[in-house]
Image: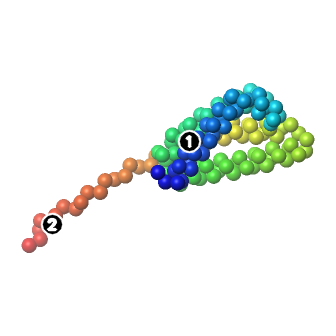
Amino acid sequence: MTRMLAGAIGDGVFKVVLGAAFLVGGARFGDLLGAPTWLLAVSGAALLIGGGIEAAYVRRRPMATCLRLMIAYDIGWVLASAGALVLAWQGSTAGGELWTAYLTAAPLVLAALLVGAAATPAPTPVRPSAPDTLAP
């Protein structure tokens, strides 16, 4: 297993763990983030589903496709986090809802794109060439 593949699987596992934490500790995270408990429960379920699909499908898809999708996801996460911080600094309670809403939608979109991506073709076995029977 390559480091990139291990990292991609780890990314999916991280989403699963975060989703489980949201489901188990939704009320505590909701108080911390200023988001309703139901949104954290929905987000936790989405993270569990999306992370599970990501961890399962990353082996079946070209690594270049997986990396592009994960980079796009992480850029979106950074932008959503920055937007949430700006809202929080302005005294709004919508920052936690924005961040949690991103964590609800983005894993499902990533999973759908991974499932829809072209599968990695199976390696073609290399057969030794036949002996030259025409040589003298």
Q: Nearer the viewer, residue 79 or 9?
A: 9
Circle 2 is placed at which residue position? 132
Q: Nearer the viewer, residue 11 or 28?
A: 28
Q: Position of residue 30 (x, y in %)?
A: 78, 32
Q: Is residue 66 left or right of residue 20?
A: left
Q: Is residue 126 left or right of residue 82?
A: left
Viewer-nearest of labels 2 and 1? Answer: 1
Circle 1 is placed at which residue position? 54
Residue 112: tell me if it is visible.
no
> At 59% from the left edge and 53% from the top edge, which residue is drawn?
68
Image quarter (top left, top right, bottom left or bottom right) of the C terminus: bottom left
Helix, strand or loop at label 2? It is loop
Color style of the picture: rainbow
Dot 2 alpha-carbon crowd within 10 angstroms: few under 14, some 14 to 19, many 20 or more: few
Q: In the rendered structure, which amino acid carries the disc numbered 2?
A: Asp
Q: In the rendered structure, which amino acid carries the disc numbered 1?
A: Glu
Q: What's the distance in space between the residues labelled 2 and 1, CA to CA? A: 49 Å
Q: Position of residue 39 (x, y in %)?
A: 74, 30
Q: Is residue 101 left or right of residue 66?
A: right
Q: Position of residue 45 (x, y in %)?
A: 64, 31
> At 54% from the left edge and 41% from the top edge, which residue is drawn?
55
Q: Is the residue 59 above or below the residue 44 in the image?
A: below
Q: How many marks?
A: 2
> Mark 1 or mark 2, which is nearer the start of the sequence?
1
